[in-house]
Image: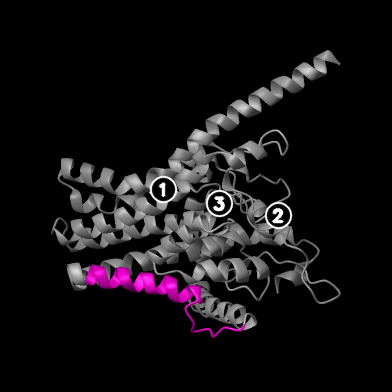
Amino acid sequence: MNSQHAIQRSASTRRRLLLRLKKYSFLIAMLPLALPPLLLTAGEATGLVNLFAWGVPFVVFGIIPLLDRVLGQDALNPDEQADVPHMNNEAFYRVMTLGWVAAYAAILVWGIQLLASGRFDAFGSVGWVVSIGIVGGLGINVAHELIHKDGKLEPWAGGALLSLVCYGGFKVEHLRGHHVHVSTPEDASSSRYNQSLYDFLPKAYVRNFLNAWRLEAVRLKRKGHSPWSWRNELIWWYSLSALVLLGLTAGYGWLGAIYFLGQSFIAFTLLEIVNYLEHYGLHRRKLDNGRYERTLPEHSWNSNYFLTNVFLFHLQRHSDHHAYAKRRYQVLRHHEIAPQLPAGYAAMVVLALFPPLWRKVMNPRVEAYYQGEEYQLL
C-alpha cells in the first residue's frame, strides 16, 4: 500500500512539474508578434530585406511543421481536482491573451509605417502585407479564446482584435452559429466530405457574414429592439474597423487602405482554412427525433503536436473545446477518442491548399471513422 501511494505521489509530482514547464512554454504563442521585427532586422543585416519580408509564412508554414516532427506530441492532461482550479485562476495565462490585443494593434501601425517608408520593393511589399496578415490570422485565434469567456473585458477585447482584421461578425456567428450547428449541414464553418478548400472558402465568407447579422437581428428582436439600433454589437465592431480604415487612409493614402484590407483578407482567410480542416467530413449523427446528437469530442479533428499546440494556445485540442466551450486554453485536454490529424495545423493548412493531396491523406481517415455508416458521408 505504501509503495502504491509513493508511486502515485511520484506521478503527481512529475505531472505538476511538466505542467509548470508547459505553462512557460506558452510564451511561444507570443512569437508571432516578434517575428516581423526580428525578420526585418535579419533582412536589413543581410541586405535581403525584400526576401525576409516574406519570412512569416516561411517560419509558420515551413519551419514550425518541421520542428513539430522533431519535438513530437504531448498528451499531458491536468488533473481536474488537483490542477484545473488553480490553473484557471492564474493571471499569467490571461495576461498573455489580453496583451496580444494591444501588441497586435501596435504591430499593425508599425507595419504601415515601414511599408510607407519605401523600405520594400513591390515583391517585398506584398510579402510584408502577407506576413502582417498571417500574424493577424494568429491573432484571430487569440480573439477566439477571449470571446468564449464570461464577463466583459475578455469578450470585448476579443471583439476589438477581430475588428482589426475586419472580421467582427466572427464574435457573433462563432458563438451562436458555429458552436450550435458544428458538424451539421447547417454550419458554414464545417467542411463536408470531399469538399475542396476552394469550394468551401467563398461559401464560408458569405454565409458567416450574413448569418452573424441574422443572429444578432434575432437576438435584438427578441428583446424588442431594432436590428439597426446602437445595441447591435456588429455595428460597433464594423464601425471600429471602418475607423481604422479611415485613419490609415487619411495617414497613408491608398497604401494605408490596401495594407489594412489586404492584411485583413489574409487574416480571415487563414481563419477559414483552419475552420476547414478542424471539422472536415465529420458529422453529428441525426437522431430518430430529427435532432442532432450532442457535440462530442469525436466531432472535431484533434492534433497533439506540442509546438503547434503551445504556438496556438491549445487550439489543436479542438475536440475538448467544442465539447466544453468555456474551458480555458491552458486546461484543454487531449481525448484519445477524438479523430487525430496526421500533423499539426501549420502543416495541414499547407496540405489543404492542394485538394488532391488533401483528399488522399484525409478521406481514408474520414472513411475509417464512419466505417459501417457510410451513408453519413453523403
Element on which disc 2 rests: helix
Q: Is residue 80 left or right of residue 99?
A: right
Q: Is residue 247 above or below residue 91?
A: below
Q: Residue at x 76, y 23 (%)?
A: 8
> Which residue was labeled with disc 3?
315
Residue wearing tag 1: 99
The answer to whether marks 1 and 2 mark residues whose Cβ atoms lie closer than 8 Å is: no
What residue is drawn where x is 83% and y is 14%? 2
Which of the image's four quarters has the C terminus? Answer: bottom right
Q: Quadrant of residue 235?
A: bottom left
* Quarter residue 300 falls in: bottom right
What residue type is disc 3 on?
Answer: Leu
> Main SS of the magenta segment?
helix
At label 1, the amino acid type is Gly
Q: What's under tag 2, amino acid-wise?
A: Pro
Report the residue that reaches farthest toward the top: 2
Between 232 and 307, the one nearer to me in the picture: 232
